[in-house]
Amino acid sequence: MKILVCVKQVPDTSGKVAVHADGTLDRASMQTIINPDDLNAVEAALKLKDDTGAPVTVITMGPPQAESMLRELLAMGADKAVLVSGREFGGSDTYATSQILAAAIKQIGVDEDDVVFCGRQAIDGDTAQVGPQIAEKLGLPQVTYAADIQKDGNKITVKRMLEDGYMIIDVKTPCLITCIKELNQPRYMTVNGIRRAFAADIEVFDYERLKDDPLIEKTTIGLSGSPTNILTSFTPPLKGAGMMLEGADQTTCDTLAGILADKHII
């Protein structure tokens, strides 16, 4: 059994977002973090490792500097890290990204007992598309928005979050599961883990390594192979200070009602 986790290094959106002229993010000029939902996916994988002893491999597609993120995940307890990196992959949208990651996962191999974890969505796109698209391209059953995961043999029971409740789904391995923040609390790196992470080798899958896969064609990867076109990208303006009304008398209530009526809220 193997456990695979797809992760992404994303811009820290609490700061200023820089954009190239073609609409793609200028990632080199921004501070980066590990995508928050992906940390929950990593924790789910590590918990399953604790229960079964199966090794955990973390996979990311990104520039060479994404190696630092992978070492953090190794320090948390992952056993192996794979960096999918190449200029040919730059500018990929969710469709192209899922093509590339699916090809990388095929290189690693998905066996009968294996599980692939992804975060629900990335904070730089908020599409929640890459995980499900990878599952479709690998022919794997998928369960999204996992709020609880229990494994029994080759069956996994997932408590899937809905807008108004939960759904309990049984799925057989191999499968792909996307994780939400309510699933768990990611663990911290350990001192021994940090020492091991910086001594570990990170395997790199470049274009030459993946180009023979049917999923990898110049027409379906990178900016030119991405069907999504970004018309414009910008940092939204900061909201102005709110209006505070003090008091709990009739006059205050009438004032509040008047303001809400003027804004056509009531």
Image (cartoon, grey):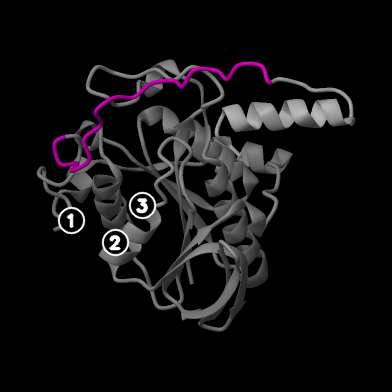
Do the numbered discs 3 and 2 sit on residues whose CB atoms are within 8 Å?
Answer: no
Do the numbered discs 1 and 3 sit on residues whose CB atoms are within 8 Å?
Answer: no
Do the numbered discs 2 and 1 sit on residues whose CB atoms are within 8 Å?
Answer: yes
- The amino acid type of the residue labelled 1 equals Leu
Drawn side of residue 225 relative to residue 153, left or right: left
| Mark 1 vs mark 3, CA separation in Å | 15 Å
| Mark 3 vs mark 2, CA separation in Å | 16 Å
Span of residues in magenta: 224-242
Q: Position of residue 210 (x, y in %)?
A: 21, 49
Say if residue 108 shows up in the picture. no
Q: First in sequence, mark 1 or 3: give its number.
A: 3
- The amino acid type of the residue labelled 3 equals Val
Label 1 or label 3, whichever lies nearer to me, is 3
Q: In the rendered image of this protein, does residue 58 appear above or below residue 136? A: above
Q: Which part of the image, by quadrant, shows the C terminus?
A: top right
Q: Position of residue 251 (x, y in %)?
A: 83, 26
Q: Is residue 234 magenta?
A: yes
- Residue displayed at 30% across by 52% down: 98
User: SS class of the residue under badge 3?
Assistant: helix
Drawn side of residue 227 relative to residue 9, left or right: left
Which residue is labeled 2 in the image? 106
Which residue is labeled 1 in the image? 215
- The amino acid type of the residue labelled 2 equals Lys
Classify mark 2: residues with Cα within 10 Å, few (<14), some (14-19) or many (20+). few
Which residue is labeled 3 in the image? 130
Q: First in sequence, mark 2 or 1: give its number.
A: 2
